[in-house]
Amino acid sequence: MRDIQVLKEALENIVKAKSWEWPEKAVIELPKDPKHGDLATNIAMTLAKVCQKAPRAIAEEICAELSGNPLVEKVEIAGPGFINVTFKQSFWHEQVLLMEGLKDAFGSLTYGNNRKVNVEYVSANPTGPLHIGHGRGAAVGDSMARILRFAGYDVSTEYYINDAGLQMRLLGLSTWLRMQDLCNMPVTYPEDYYKGEYIIDIAKEMLKEDPELPQRSDAEYRCFKYAMQSIMDGIKKDLEDFRVEHQVWFSESSLVNTGVVEKTLRSLKEKGYVYEQDGALWFKATLFGDDKDRVLRKRDGFLTYFASDIAYHADKINRGFDEMIDVWGADHHGYVPRMAAAIETLGKNPKEDFTVILIQLVNLLRGGEPVAMSTRSGEFITLREVVDEVGVDAARFMFLSRKSDQPLDFDLDLVKQRNLENPVYYVQYAHARIKTLLRRAAENGHVLPETSELDVLSELTDSSDIALIRAALHFEEAVLDAAKAKAVHIISFYLMDLAGKFHSYYANTPVLSGEAKAVLARLALLRVVGTVLRSGLNLLGVEAPETM
C-alpha cells in the first residue's frame, strides 16, 4: 500500500503541476508480470480525452517527471500508454525499517476515523446449543470487529437475545412437557416442540431441584425462565471458549417491557410509514420496492419479529452508533431489503450506515464424506463438538477461509493434519518457523538489534527479498480492503499468500548461511514477516505459535 501511496502522490503532483485534473478511472496496481516493474498505471490513457493528446505522448511527459524522483529506479511505457514503475532497492529497505519501528502497530489505520460502529452477530435464539453455522457467524462477526478496530473504528460488539415471542413460549412448553413425561404423567407433544436431548437434561435438573414442580401453577413459566437461562449460560461459555467477545447482551423483551417498541411504532405512524388494516398494523414496505407491505402487529395483538427488529435498530441509533453491521444466516437474505427500508425510515442511509454480512451453510465432512448428524443435539452438529475435536484455531481459521456468503466444506480430518495441506497449519507453521530461525540464529551469534541499519538491509538485493518485503508491506492494503468491504476472508487469503511466499523464500534462500551482514539482513526481513503473520492471525482470533 505504501508503494502505491508513494506513486500516487508523485503522480498527483505531476498532474497538478501540469494543470490537469486527476482522472477518476486512473488505476495503480501490481503488474501481471513482475518483470515489468513494481507498479503499473493507466493514468496516461485515462487523461488522453481531457488533454486531447495521444496516451503515449502523455505517458512520455509523466515518465520524464517520474525519472527525476529520488525513489524511482526506472520508468517505462508499455503498449498504448501504460506506465511501469520500478522503485530503487533503497526504497524497499526503508520499508523494512518502517515495519520494524511500528512492530505490532504496523497495518493499523486511521481510516475509520473513530466512527462508532455496532457489530451484532450470532444472536441465536436461546432455544438450544450453538451449531456449526452459528460458529461460522461467530468467527466472522468477532473477526470483523477486530479488523474494524485495527482500521480505526470505535467498535461495540453485541448479541441480541431473542427472549420474547413464540419460540421462547415453545421452549418453556417443551421443557414442561418433558418434565411431565419424566414423571410418567400423560403428555401430548405438539408437532413443533423442541426434541433435543438437552431439553430432557434441563427438565431433569429442574426436577432434581424441585420434585413438586410439575404440579405448580406457574410450572410452565418457570420452565421457560430456567431453560432460557441454562441455554444462554451454555451459549456464553461456548462463545468464550471460542475466543468470541460480546460486550453487550441485549434483551429483546426489554424493548417490549420498556415501551421502546410501541414508541418506535408510533413514531413511524406519525411519519406516514405505518397504517392499520384488518385489525393489524402494517409497515409500508412497498414504498421501498418490496412486493408487499409487512405486518408489525398481528390481529391477535402479538408483535412480529420485524416490529422488534425495527425498534432494536432504532435503539442502536439512539445509543449514538453511526453505523450498524448485522451478521445473519444466508436464509435471511430476503429480509435484508425490508430491514434496509426500515433503517431509512429511522433517518439513516442504509447504503452507508447499515450492512448485513450473510453467512452460508457449513458442510461438515470427514475424509471427504459428509458427517452424520449429532445424536446428542438431536438436530445438528454443535459448535462445541467441532471445537472439542479440532481446536479453536483450526475451527476459526477454516470458518474464515472462504467468503462468508459462500458454502463452506469443513473437513475434520484435513484440519487436524500437521502438514502444509492444512490451511491453518500452513500459516501458523510459517510464523513458528520464523521464530525458530531467529532463535537458532541467536544461538549461532547472529543477534538482531531492535532496529536494523540501512547499511545492513542493503544486502537485500535479490528479487525474492524485494518480493517478500512487498508482500509484508501490503498487509496495510489487506486491512483497508477488509474494512471497506466488510469481508474477513480478505485477511485469511492475504495470510495464505504471505505464508506461501515465505515458505518459497525459505526453500530457496540460505537464510542462515553466508556473510554475517547478509544473514542479519535476511533475519530482519523475516522478523517483520513474522510480526505481520502474528498480527493477521490475531485479527482472525487465531494464535501464532512460536514452536510447532
Image (cartoon, rainbow, N blue to C red):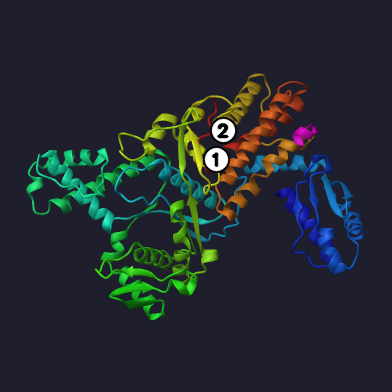
401 relative to 389 in the view: left or right: right
Percent x, y for residue 487?
A: 56, 50
Percent x, y for residue 445?
A: 67, 21
Query: What element does badge 1 sit on?
Result: loop
Which corner quadrant of the image does residue 208 belong to? top left
Q: Which mark is residue 423?
A: 2
374 relative to 414 in the view: left or right: left
Which region is colored magenta?
A: 459-466
Rate crowding at label 2 as few (under 14), some (14 to 19) or many (20 or more) other CA atoms within 10 Å. Answer: many
Q: Nearer the viewer, residue 463 or 40?
A: 40
Q: How many marks?
A: 2
Which corner quadrant of the image does residue 273 belong to? bottom left
Q: Residue 121 magenta-drawn?
A: no
Q: Residue at x 67, y 32 (%)?
A: 502
Q: Is residue 487 visible?
A: yes
Amino acid of disc 1 = Ser
Q: Residue at x 27, y 57 (%)?
A: 166
Q: Nearer the viewer, residue 91 or 158?
A: 158
Sequence-wise, the earlier of marks 2 and 1 is 1
Q: Is residue 33 above or below residue 440?
A: below
453 relative to 377 in the view: left or right: right
Q: Residue at x 28, y 65 (%)?
A: 256
Amino acid of disc 2 = Pro
Do tag 2 and tag 1 residues touch (Cβ < 8 Å)? yes
Percent x, y for residue 529?
A: 65, 36
Q: Is residue 409 above or below residue 57?
A: above
Residue that mark 1 sits on: 401
Q: Is residue 52 above or below residue 450?
A: below
Q: Residue at x 75, y 34 (%)?
A: 465
Quadrant that contains the C terminus: top right
